[in-house]
Image (cartoon, grey):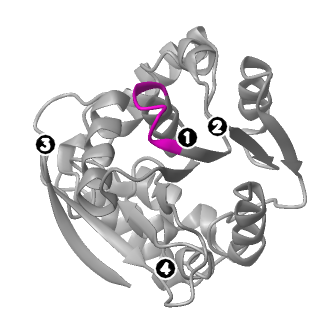
Amino acid sequence: MRHGYSETDYGQVHWRQCEHDSRSASADLYCLHPAPFSGLAFTSVMPLLASDYRVIAPDYPGHGGSAPLMRAASIDDYAIAVQQVANDLSGSASIDLVGFHTGCLVALAMAVRWPERIRRMVLIDVPAFDRQTRETLKADLGGMFEFSEALSCLAGPWERSVKRRAGTEPVERSVALFAEQLRHGTRMNAAFAAAFSYDVEAAFSANTRPTTIVATASALLAATRRAASLAPDAEFIERLDIQRSVLDECAQVTAAFILTCLID
């Protein structure tokens, strides 16, 4: 696993990269992470995807090792930053995309903005909520995070990163993800706010790139089925055998179906 930075309009964007000398695919594969984490979320699955691809997982501006973003961000901001990373690392070549949760929306925004650059994309567990639900979730989850001297203020991030993952991955891995989201400081919820402000209906309507939508047995199952209804030309796959820890405990299975979906 290599680490590096690309200069973008949003400052330096940190990325992780993994590849094998024997990789067979000509396109690079960009992995787009869920809120409120970073490209660290993909480090279990990246080496498995690298059997075929050069795999790159950027951290959105204001996330992980990337430069802070001291204003409200949008999904389009994240998409522009990732595209500028792709311009730096992949030149003018077409690329493939894998999105997970919030990363699905970033991938979709990239496909709408630069259809000529996106070869194929796989969207796993898509937060394609209706407008009313998005407004409610934004109000509940999208505000500035408030720190205090009391350790209890971190109960929500701890629940999301560690307690919900108990038994599905080593606790050290969960704690690393917990620490990663704390790097955002008071803007820890910025990507949630961006996701729940995104017009997913318009984006799916405008998308012309070959797309596979994958639903696992997660809390986003209904929303992902809704995504498939918004994208009738997309391939839709339900993997209800995958019931938890898509990118870690189920990394082998997840990598295998991603590679299958990206075959021409």
Inter-mark Cα distance, 3 to 2: 26 Å
The secondary element bearing badge 1 is classed as: helix
Q: Quadrant of the N terminus?
A: bottom left
Q: Closer to us: mark 1 or mark 4? A: 1
Inter-mark Cα distance, 1 to 3: 21 Å
The secondary element bearing badge 4 is classed as: helix
Residue 263 position by quadrant: bottom right
Q: Amino acid at mark 1?
A: Cys
Residue under circle 2?
126
Residue under circle 1?
104
Inter-mark Cα distance, 3 to 4: 29 Å
Outermost residue toward the bottom in this view = 21
Residue under circle 3?
10
Q: Magenta residues, as a range? A: 112-118
Inter-mark Cα distance, 4 to 2: 24 Å
Q: Position of residue 51 (x, y in %)?
A: 61, 82
Foreground residue among 196 and 208 = 208
Q: Position of residue 191 (x, y in %)?
A: 36, 38
